[in-house]
Amino acid sequence: MTTTRNTTAKKYRLARNAAVLATAAAMLTASVGIGTAAAGATERPTAFTPAHQGGTAVMEDVARRVMAAGPPGYVARVDDGRRVTRTVAGLADIATGRRMAARDQFEAGSNTKTFTATLVLQLVDRGQIELDAPVSRYLPGVVPNGRNITVRMLLNHTSGLSSYTADGGFMSGLKVDPQRVWTDRELLAVAFRHQPNFPPGQEWSYSNTNYTLLGMILEKLTGKGMAELVQQRIAGPLGLRHTYYADPRATNTGPGYAHGYGVEFAGPKPVYIDTATWPIGGWGGAAGAVISTTDDLSRFFSAVLQGKLFSKAQLKQMTTTVAMPGDFGLKGGYGLGLIRLDTACGTVWGHGGDTLGLHSIALATADGRRTVVSAANGEPFDAEPNARTDHYYTVTMAATDASVCVMLGKPVPASVLKDLQSPPPAPTTAG
């Protein structure tokens, strides 16, 4: 899921200690090792040695830097078109000390939007949905000004509808009552308390509300819930054995589960809040409730970009983008549930996901033959921005660029390395 807490945070939506954080991350790294293994090799990471060269060394450095920014663990899978390597570091569960594993499941957050968009485009192929039809055709009386908002506008975030996660009371409420399961109608009520950001189709603004509405349309037209649709029409056909839609909690934890942690950075040392049992499906829904793995997300995004889940005509629609505003912080464009990201090493396609405890990114080349998927199980949880939350987002943004460079077989530019290797700021002395 993408949530907006401050300007720096917005920069990493697809859309993130001083000595204390650096030391803690170093201890975790030393205890479990950072390793990058070729596909087919042992899953348990091996210790890093200076003999490792090229992309392997880059990804090991990425893992260290991301963990030094706060998350207790990190996992990445890079397919450069010739071989698959996996980098694993840190802990999946702080309480038990369980190490992160390459095939751990995790909350995929807003990567779910590409799943939801795929389901919509499948119905377009079947003639059940028209992209330029008004939302009021499918959900009469539900959306203010729904006659002037189209399905396409929901998919590419040009509807103007306010995101329910932009409501400060809603976000603080999730911390006060984390086990609450929200209905779609309740989420819409939060969003519709706010005036639209702009007239339909006039600008671009990322809104989880758009995808809540798309999920409602899908369920109404098919008579099936989102969990069943994801399984029957995406996970099953592609053989995604460890991917499912949390309804409302992550219960099918397969080969292993990476706990998510909300990290409160303000104060002399970070505070980690385990969010693994919180019902991501109870507020993320069609905008962010998918649980997956790096392997499964790689296969999914490859299939999307190769047109394996819908027609070539719909792939063209999906990859037709609108401009994202400059202050969003990402260079590229937004299609139908798919981001075109113009990185320092080249253009790639995919999405990202931020929940209350996980940050992930899933990207692929336009032909779907190369992919990179990563996840860090920590997300800033502070009510107000501070130097360490800013540092988190700077490092994780640079980590994405660096991993794309590795996927494309290109050297990481000095500007990216500067951000990636920037030192954590000093902790605050106040409580």
Image (tube, grey):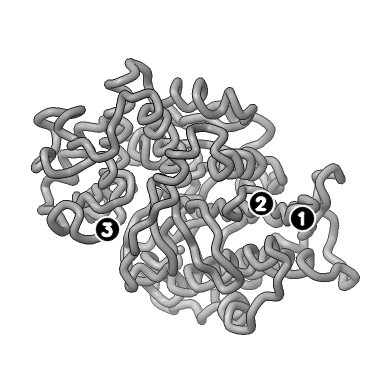
- Image point (86%, 68%), residue name: 52
Can you give x and y, in whole percent of width and height, for residue 89 in the image? 71, 56
- Depth check: give the residue in front, 417 or 140: 140
- Depth check: give the residue in front, 412 or 399: 412
Q: Is residue 134 left or right of residue 131?
A: left
Nearer the observer, disc 2 or disc 3? 3
- Depth check: give the residue in front, 278 or 34: 34
- Neighbour class for label 3 at 10 Å: few (<14), some, many (≥20)? some
- Depth check: give the residue in front, 416 or 125: 125
Circles 1 and 2: CB distance less than 8 Å? yes
Please state which amino acid type lies under the numbered disc 3.
Answer: Ser
Please state which amino acid type lies under the numbered disc 1.
Answer: Val
Circles 2 and 3: CB distance less than 8 Å? no
User: In the picture, which quadrant includes the C terminus?
Assistant: bottom left
Q: Of helix, strand and loop, which one carries label 1?
A: helix
How far apart are the two marked residues, 2 and 3, measured between alpha carbons?
35 Å
Q: Of helix, strand and loop, which one carries label 3?
A: loop
Can you give x and y, in whole percent of width and height, for residue 66 in the image? 60, 66
Q: Disc 2 designates what residue? A: 91
Can you give x and y, in whole percent of width and height, for residue 74 in the image? 64, 55
* Badge count: 3
First of labels 1, 3 by sequence position: 1
Please state which amino acid type lies under the numbered disc 2.
Answer: Leu
Tag shown at residue 32: 1
Q: Is residue 182 above or below residue 81?
A: above
How far apart are the two marked residues, 1 and 3, measured between alpha carbons?
41 Å
Q: Is residue 359 left or right of residue 293?
A: left
Can you give x and y, in whole percent of width and height, for residue 182 in the image? 28, 33
First of labels 2, 3 by sequence position: 2
Q: Disc 3 designates what residue? A: 205
